[in-house]
Image (cartoon, grey):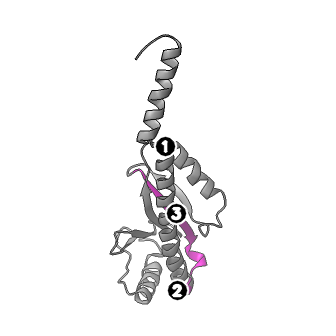
Amino acid sequence: MGAYHKVLDHYLQVAGSKIGSKLFLDKNGLCVLRQENGREYVVELPRSSEVVYFYSPICTVPYGCSEEFFERVLELNLCGVAYNQAAFGLDAKTQNIVLSYARSMEALDEVAFSNILNNFIKTADRAEKDLVKLVKELIEQTSLTEDDIDMEIKAHRAISNNGKLKV
């Protein structure tokens, strides 16, 4: 166990009592906070590390518009102000977009840790809402409607009829 394991465990217990959850660091250096709605927030302190990581799965990569989706997510990462210095990344195993934030244990005390955890939870919740909205917009833009298909067929027929081909 690293030197900061007990310290972070104590910070988690203090923060947990403020938010009404029993939080603790397990033997692997992980603390997972699960909300009733299924949202997860993870605090991790890797062995022999002085950096604590906060991360939360936000959404899966949408099928059919992934290029546009990644472009927009990269734009969101450009300026850290929008998500309080947290950044989006891809978990290759799950194909989830994850919001993450890292902080040195040296810069933390009970109050700072509690504030960071609370702010990270709020930021991750907002990020999820923003990306769900983005996915919905992208799917609407890239999905063909029946009218789109009818117009394509009519355009194809018009081109074919001008060239004396009848379909």
**Magenta region:** 95-111
Mark 2 packing: few (<14 Cα in 10 Å), some, or many (20+)?
some
Q: Nearer the viewer, mark 2 or mark 1?
A: 1
Specify whether residue 93 is painted magenta: no
- Left or right, residue 58 beside residue 86: left
Badge 3 crowding class, 10 Å Cα cut-off, few under 14, some 14 to 19, many 20 or more, is: few
Residue hosting label 3: 130
Res. 100 mark: none
At label 3, which amino acid type do we have?
A: Asp
Task: Determine whether the residue tagged by mark 2 lies in a helix, strand or loop.
Answer: helix
Residue 146 left/right relative to 133: left
Provide the residue designation for mark 1. 142
Q: Kindly tell me whether residue 53 is visible in this rendering.
A: no
Kindly identify the residue that appears in the image at 61 percent across and 57 percent down: 77
User: Residue 100 in magenta?
Assistant: yes
Residue 148 point in image, percent of width and height: 47, 38
Instruction: Return the residue at label 2.
Output: 110
Q: Secondary structure at mark 3?
A: helix
